[in-house]
Image: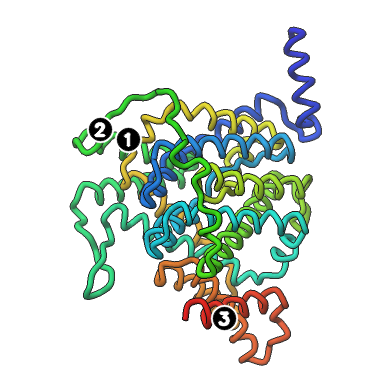
Amino acid sequence: MSQSQHARGGLLERLFGLKAHATDARTEVIAGITTFLTMVYIVFVNPQILSNAGMDTQAVFVTTCLIAGIGSILMGLLANLPIALAPAMGLNAFFAFVVVGGMGYSWQVGMGTIFWGAVGLLILTLFRVRYWLIGNIPLSLRVGITAGIGLLIALLGMHNAGMVVASPATMVTVGKLTSLPCLLGALGFFLICIFSSKGIHSAVLIAIAVTTALGWAFGDVTFQGLVSLPPSITPVFGQLDLMGSLDIGLAGVIFSFMLVNLFDSSGTLIGVTNRAKLADDKGHFPRMKEALMVDSVSSVGGAFMGTSSVTAYIESSSGVAVGGRSGLTAVVVGLLFLLAIFFSPLAAMVPAYAAAGALMYVGVLMCSELTRVEWEDLTEAVPAFMTTVMMPFSFSITEGIAVGFISYCVMKAGTGRWREVNPCVLAVALLFILKFVWVDH
């Protein structure tokens, strides 16, 4: 081994403690590549979704790569965990289709709500309130929030593929199932499911590539090249409306972004570190404070740069599965995201129906959480059910969370079990009741 290789090995050992984690540089690099391949779909899907809010697709592609790259590298260097960060699926759809499309706000104001939600999450992290919230919100509500977002995402995926369309008679109805977008959207969904069941880590990326290629073959997609200099991020960078987003009518939206990001990111961090055998029985893991700080700061930075809430990605578990144990895995992921910036023409080719399968698949994964609900206990089952169904039926994550918290208090109090309602749940429920009475009225 040369002197430079010795020096490089010594530096990596000092930064990431590879021997202490029973791993080596080669294993970590392979793990990083594996994680990247399982989550790189976000650089195609996120611009596609945010473009529905009127944001510049090419600029969002670059900011998505940038924040995923920077966030993942920071997680690797500061927290030394094999966990990658990127804009969250679900919250990007909530922003584009509900806050902007449904409520009628500009994307600049909507991005401001994401920013303030991220600032709230950062404050909760700084004052350690985040740990208290995670431990005090009941499992039934956490599961309901996850599953409800999953159903809402799946509905959006079906709509983007033309499988489900609006109907004045029945509210929603089946679209033209023989149309090209519908057929390719369905093909993409089943390819993801089949490949995933076979343990193929890059299932989503493969499905997006296949459906886009078929769209090109049928003349529905235009080939725009492979590599180019990065497009300008000026159309979205720093364009958020901070003052306009402080409207009292958006308080529930800001709270929703903060709350959903809190559970999504915290749950992923605990889940991945547990799989990597880094967490203890209580879910605590090394450098937990640093990890929570990195994901909070990344969300604030992401909103300012012009992309939706940033979170830890459950796909990081694919890298852990092939041996990733240290922050070197996350650093490799981050560097690959930064390299992806030069492939913007590929992102511009991806049609909406190519990303639809990924949205539907995310719905499958998120709804699987419902098995954790104690269905025989109606005081737990009803809040979980109401939270889950209200999100797609009302087309709002905020209303689903609100109804879930309120129904939890009603069910516990109505059955004489009010002592089970902790102050955290009661406070949130009362805040939502005040919102319904004074703000929504």
Question: Image point 29% across, 34% down: which residue?
Answer: 213
Q: Residue furthest front?
A: 243
Q: Are marks 2 and 1 in contact (CB under 8 Å)?
A: yes
Lower position in the chain sequence, tag 3 or tag 1: 1
Q: Are marks 2 and 3 in contact (CB under 8 Å)?
A: no
- Report helix, strand or loop for mark 3: helix
Which percent across, then down, holds residue 200?
47, 39
Q: Nearer the viewer, mark 3 or mark 1?
A: 3
Q: Is residue 341 above or below residue 151?
A: above
- Identify the amino acid type marked 1: Met
Q: Is residue 81 above or below residue 401?
A: above
Q: Are marks 3 and 1 in contact (CB under 8 Å)?
A: no
Question: Image point 67% across, 77% down: which residue?
Answer: 427
Q: Quadrant of residue 66?
A: top right
- Identify the amino acid type marked 2: Thr
Q: Seen in the image, is 268 located left or right of residue 36?
A: right
Q: Label 1 belongs to which residue?
A: 349
- Report helix, strand or loop for mark 1: helix
- Identify the amino acid type marked 3: Ile
Kindly report the distance in space between the C-alpha atoms of the residues bearing marks 2 and 1: 6 Å
Q: Label 3 belongs to which residue?
A: 433
Question: Image point 75% across, 19% down: which residue?
Answer: 9
Q: Nearer the viewer, residue 104 or 44?
A: 104
Question: How was the colour assigned to the protein in this rendering?
Answer: rainbow
* Label 3 Cα neighbours within 10 Å, binned few <14 / some 14-19 / many ≥20: some
Q: Seen in the image, is 354 located left or right of residue 262?
A: left
Q: Nearer the viewer, mark 2 or mark 3?
A: 3
